[in-house]
Amino acid sequence: MRHIALGICSAVFVLQLCLGQETVRTEIELQGQPLVSEPEAVTGCRYLWDEYKRLAKYAQAHPEVLLTRKAAEPAWNFEVGSQYSWWARNFTTSSYYQTASTCRAKGSNCYVFVEDSLWNVRVTQAQVDSIQVYFDSRTPAFTTKGIYQVDVETFGDPPNIDNDQKIIILILNILDGFTSGSPSFVAGYFDPRNELALSNSNQAEIYYLDANPLNLGTAGGLTNAIRTTAHEFQHMIHWRYDGNEISFVNEGLSEVAEVVVGYPIRTQTEYVNNTDVYLLGWNNSLADYARAARWVLYLWNQFPNGLLKLLVANPLQGILGIEGALAQYTPATSRRFGDLFPDWLVANHLNDRAVNERFGYTYSPLEKAFAVRTHLDPNVPPTPDGVQRLAADYVKYGAGSNLSVTFSTSSNLEVKAIEIGTANKRVLDVTPNTPFNEPLFGSTYYEIVFIIINNSQTSDGNYIYTSTGSGGAQSTTLSYEGSAAFFTRLPSGEGEKYAVRFSPPVTGQLSAVRIAFNGGPNGVKGSGTLNIRAHKNALGSIGGIPGVQVGSTVSVPFSSLIPGAYNEISFNSANVSITSGEDFHVSVDVTGSVGDTLQLLVDDGLSQPTDRSSTYRQGVMGPGWYNFIDPNSGFTRGYNLLLRATLLYTVTGVERLETVIPTSYSLSQNFPNPFNPSTKIEYQVPVSEQVVLKIYDMLGREVRTLVDELQQPGTYRTEWDGRDNSGREVVSGVYFYQLKTRGYLKTNKMMLVR
């Protein structure tokens, strides 16, 4: 395990701190440089979409700029050593410049040029050869097919306006304004200008690949390069057939291009956390990419016999293009968009093809769509809400019996019920304004999820629901989490174990834990197993050392873990009893052969680190439990595992348990994040005091005061609409929100994308 490096010299400090009857060692390893989050490698299309649309409209109005294959002209016929100055885009100024380069490889489907200033400085021959091989000969999914063949077979033929079948790959330092500490950089891009007779056009099929800061000599850098190439090559192919395709469809196809060549789908959290979003909407946010990827992945899994190629080739856009592709599909299908949309929404939560092939994906693993509300007491008063056009809400019932639910909806909404039991699952239609009664709830079916679906392409909808039943439970979630600015590798051969101490405010059963991982650029690797245990004892007795284990071990294979997201791991709640006021611990360890890319995420620091997360390792003073703290903070700030434990506690009859008073301060990550136009912030205060919640920009200037008042103990949620104290909309970018009381100070980061 690489410990969190926070200092500027090489040394090890060990402190012993007494916590009640326990002794916990605190270890800090200082290794020269701070460990910071890696900048995100993004595709250039994210910044070029406005240019795509502008060029498509211009070409439509000025057909004279359209280039066709120059049959009378010779092909490029470059050889290794050929020199050429290519036009490239400066993303910081939206202008173009020429850069001298030399052909360093010639493959069956590509020429690989390298910017001369980078040769043997940032780019070597071995790296060039790797790019050429992946484009021509192999991908993670195919040992005998490169990106070129896989994308062509899946999406169609690329354009050819230069009379040369080979694609030009130019490796260069993409001018994207990247500096040390920048959150992202452009890893590669396709520019449709090169397909038109315009100034600064190369009039060639050319793809640009970054080499600074992208490091093609590392496994992670090469992975980003190959993923981005598959993504952008789809855009090049799509330009040939339909330059006017809407962003949602075009980007969804490019996201799935990465999956087709063998890379895991990017995180879906931004969509599954908030499904009440117009399906085809596009603000160029991460949530848009997640939603588009999920939709096109479903189409590919449901219609694997060439539907995506038909979709690319169809000259119509959006839903009309999807309808046209389905009409041409072989074997013939009667399913159309109106059938697929509700089936997709069911699959996004159920994902079980054994119930019905329409209700699942062939790709795995995928996150489930989260419920906007979860009811563990079946007695729910009239609850109103709304659903945007082509969107959905999920409402979950997870405890009780004899459930009866009535939905009153506007005419454009439909409701479906997913009933889940140990041995049975089914999907039912729910009739509006009529009680939906399920006497088997609580016996055959332990969970029912209602999906409120808006099938309208133009109008939002509204609904109200109410329910009755017997028994049930409430839940409280204890969480120690932050902005995931750091990580710790799991494990390094020392037999390490990780644990978090919880102090429950109620007596009940441990229902589930949710743990956040970062799988690295290649996803979760290795054949190991993650073991989760609950303990009602001291830290010194956790996992492998005698102690009282209150629940049987839950073991999860790495292959089922989703990187970059919370993974929910359920306990048999009947076996894990927790008592109010009595601390318990959740520990994590691994067995088997483990790859080096599984990383357990930790937060960016809490004020009292030594009573939260600990790591068991050999250490400089022998075996023991260690915490990681920041010496630059005067040893007052620590780093804690991102882990949540959910407790169920019983509600008898129809009684409603009031909100539990928090036992500690907390400031949760805003949701959604990134966001547009608004986001919600939740926090807890355990005592009555003055509470201040403010928004700051990157320069530390106050943008907005959301809360400044005396508040009673409790859990609060407030919303920021992206406006400053004067009511003006602020620009896109990174902002910080800070919760401050007399005894607590915590700052988190968020991103606004206009």
Image: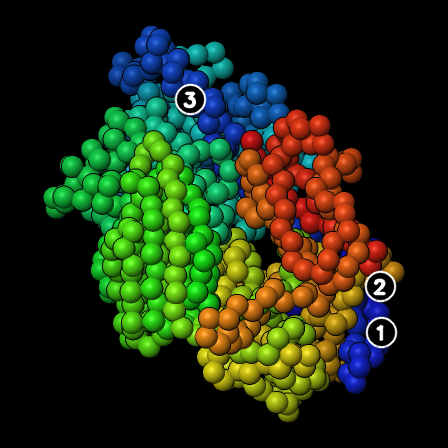
Depth check, front residue: 453 or 309: 453
Amino acid on which the number 3 mark rests in the picture: Lys
**Left-right relation of 587 to 743:** left
Amino acid on which the number 2 mark rests in the picture: Phe
| Residue at the farthest bottom position | 546
Q: Which residue is mark 3?
A: 53
Q: Residue at x 14, y 44 (%)?
A: 334
Q: Residue at x 31, y 37 (%)?
A: 456
Image vertical order of residue 606 relative to residue 473, above or below: above
The image quarter containing residue 254 is top left
Depth check, front residue: 688 or 26: 688
Which of the two discs, 2 and 1, labels the residue nearer the N terminus? 1
Which of the two discs, 1 and 3, labels the residue nearer the N terminus? 1
Q: CA distance from mark 1 to mark 3?
A: 60 Å
Q: Residue at x 20, y 33 (%)?
A: 324
Q: Quick check: marks 2 and 1 in contact, CB under 8 Å?
A: yes
Amino acid on which the number 1 mark rests in the picture: Leu
Give the total number of marks visible in the rendering.
3
Q: Residue at x 27, y 55 (%)?
A: 434
The percent position of residue 128, horizontal first and vertical second, equals: 49, 41
Q: CA distance from mark 2 to mark 1?
A: 10 Å
The image quarter containing residue 323 is top left
The percent position of residue 539, horizontal first and vertical second, equals: 70, 81
**Label ID, residue 15:** 1
